Image: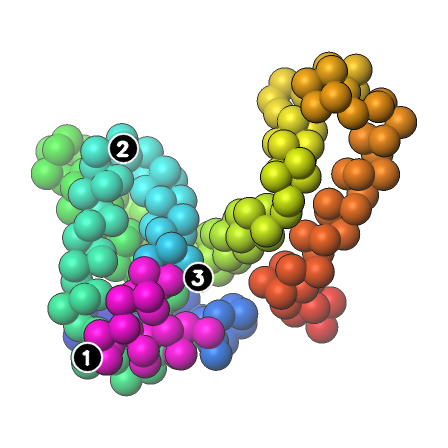
Amino acid sequence: MTEDGGAGFTGRADTSTMHDGPLVIDLVTRARTGDKRSWDALVERYAPLIWSICRRYRLGRADAEDVGQSVWLRLADQLDKIRDPAALPGWLVTTTRRECGRVMRAARGPHAAVCALDAEDLPAEQEGIAEQELLRAERNTALREAFTHLPPDGQRLIALLIADPPLPYTEVSARLGMPVGSIGPNRSRCLAKMRRYPAIAALINSEEE
C-alpha cells in the first residue's frame, strides 16, 4: 500500500531500521490466507502503536477507537494486495495519522483541520517520530508478553514494585508475605527471567548491534 492507500506499503517510515521484518512478513503471509491467529497477533502487536499516535493527536477514547477500527478495516480490505509486508508498520503509522486528521476535522472544524495538516507536513520529523513510536510500542508489547510469562508470585511482586506512587519495601513485604530481605533477590530473578524472554532478548541484541 502507498500513502494514499494503494497496495505496496511504501509509507514514509523507513522500516528497514525497525526490528519486525521477518515476524511481520510471516504474520501477514499467514493472515492473508485466513489464519485468524496471525491476524490477531498483528492486531495485538501493533494496536499500541496506533493508540500512541492517537494520544499524540490528543484524541479521546471513543475517537481513538474509531481510528483504530478504521485502520484495521482498511488493512483487512488491502491484505491480499500487499507487495511488501515488511513495510506494514510504516503504513500503519501513515494511515493512523491520516485517520486522526479525519476525525479531528470532522469533530472540531477548520481550526482542527489546520492543526492536523501542520502535524502531517513534517516528513523528516515524522520519519523519526514514526520509528520512535514503533520501537516504543514494540518494547511495551514485548514487556507485557514477558511479564505474563512470569509465575503469579513474580507478577504480583513486579506489579507492586512499579506502582505509582512507589511503595516502600515494608508495604510490599506485608502485601506479599515476603521478608523484606527477599524482595531484592526475587526482583532480580524476575527481571533476569524477563530479559531472557525471546522478544526482550531480540530487542536487547538489536540495540547492541
In this rendering, the answer to whether 80 lies above or below 18 is below
Crowding near the residue tagged with mark 3, few <14, some 14–19, many ≥20 C-alpha atoms within 10 Å: some
Magenta residues, start to end: 23-42
Q: Which residue is mark 1?
A: 80
Residue at position x 26%, y 40% from top? 64
Question: Could you tell me which secondary element the residue under label 3 belongs to?
Answer: helix
Q: Does residue 129 appear anywhere in the picture?
A: no
Which circle's residue, 3 or 1, is located before the other in the chain?
A: 1
The answer to whether residue 170 is seen in the rendering is yes
Q: Main secondary structure of the magenta part?
A: helix
Residue type (three-letter) at the residue carrying disc 1: Asp
Disc 2 from disc 1: Cα separation: 30 Å
Amino acid, disc 2: Arg
Q: Which residue is mark 3?
A: 127
Q: Residue at x 22, y 74 (%)?
A: 34
Which quadrant holds residue 72?
Answer: bottom left
Q: Which residue is mark 2?
A: 61
Instruction: State yes or no: residue 36 in magenta.
Output: yes
Q: Is the residue 39 above or below the residue 84 in the image?
A: above
Residue closest to the far bottom: 83
Q: Amino acid at mark 3?
A: Glu
